Amino acid sequence: MTNLPITLPAMKQSSGLILALLSVLSFNAFAEPAFDHYVRLTPENSAIGNYPAQKEAILTIKSGQTVKIDTGGGAGWRNPEMDPAEWLKKNNIPITVDHPAIKETIEVWAKTKRYADIQTGHFLVGPINVEGAMPGDSLELRILSVVPRIPYGSTGAGPGRSLRGADDPKPPAHITPLDLKRNVGLFTNGVEVPLAPFMGVMGVQPAVEEGSNRSSSPPGNFGGNLDARELVAGTTLYLPIFAPGARFFTGDAHAAQGDGEITGTAIETANTVIITFILHKGKTLKMPRAETATHYIAYGLDPDLENAMQQAVDETVAYINDITGWTGSDKALPLASIGVDFHVTQIVDYTKGIHSKIPKKLFKNIKNTYWYQPAR
């Protein structure tokens, strides 16, 4: 069980945060899935704001192995720039800068090597290589567990990022204590948000045509900053591969998010994620796909939301055809119109996202052999 230092003055300031902290402690006592490798959050294991092609792999694994990854976040003191200890105290957060995840986040921000003079952006961990992965293959990522490492998250706003109000003053970040025992965020008195922790960024090395230091802000056909809230424990993400080894990165830890992510952030926190990596040789994908126990998910990504919608429709038709063995659009397109829901994934990452959710229950002759079956 993690030892979280608490200061008495902070304990008196926020009973909600204390409840959340105790919930983190009790939650951490439960068993986690088995894993083959453990990647800790260090400057050497990290990248800031981009996918540096020149960075050596921090770990090379075999297909079928499982990796536990600590990530950072919850660094609300960076905007506005404040001393971390002062920021934690000001926001009545009952942990100190000696808390492992906070200490690691501070060190990563201060010491991680910057590439292409990109100074800010997502806290990323990677790259992790998979033996034998080559362009034209695909990578299956089974998300076994996603658990916040800190008892709070922050939600900022970026006026003008695809919304009106570019000239409005930026409001201060909202701090949400996390009650992991009850699986809710304590937004304010009488208002609770259900938690569904996931990683905003999960992607492989972008194609060489995108450059050797492609920004992590816009998502792409390689995955990346999808900000797709369905990518919780029990979900599988499928990614096309564009570089030898695949070179997987993750970061941008969230505790909860609504479709659209309209302010530019979710409940930004620090997570530990456990993923099983499975290589599919010769299985070529054009775009990311996902799968849950109940749905298949297709993605469309484009700076123009209408173009993203069209791509999501095209990918949905292709996914349905792969599921059924159909060809063309004669059957898949009308089925998508009457049986598939389309959602706005996010509108704030310059490249906007649409995703479709294809219900598995539509297909009566296909046995659901999905690896994860939720408790009933």
Image (spheres, rainbow, N blue to C red):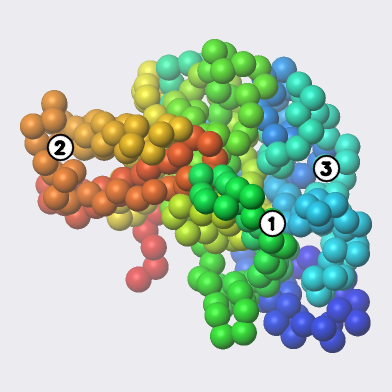
Q: Earlier in the sequence, mark 1 or mark 2?
A: 1
Up-down: is 332 above or below 80? above
The residue pinned by badge 2 equals 333
Percent of width and height locating residue 334: 11, 41
Residue nearest the observer in this picture, 78 or 38: 78
The residue pinned by badge 1 equals 169
Whether residue 372 appears in this view of the structure is: yes
Residue nearest the observer in this picture, 192 or 161: 161
Q: Quadrant of the C terminus?
A: bottom left
Up-down: is 208 above or below 46? above
Q: Is residue 268 left or right of residue 76?
A: left
Residue farthest to the left, as pictured: 330
* Residue type at numbered disc 3: Trp
Percent of width and height locating residue 145: 55, 55
Give the CA distance from mark 2 to mark 3: 47 Å
Q: Earlier in the sequence, mark 3 or mark 1?
A: 3
* Residue type at numbered disc 1: Pro
The residue pinned by badge 3 equals 109
Tell me which corner region of the image, top left, top right, bottom left or bottom right, holds residue 224: top right
Residue nearest the observer in this picture, 374 or 10: 10
Which residue is found at the position 39% from the left and 68% from the top?
375
Give the CA distance from mark 3 to mark 1: 26 Å
Give the CA distance from mark 1 to mark 2: 45 Å
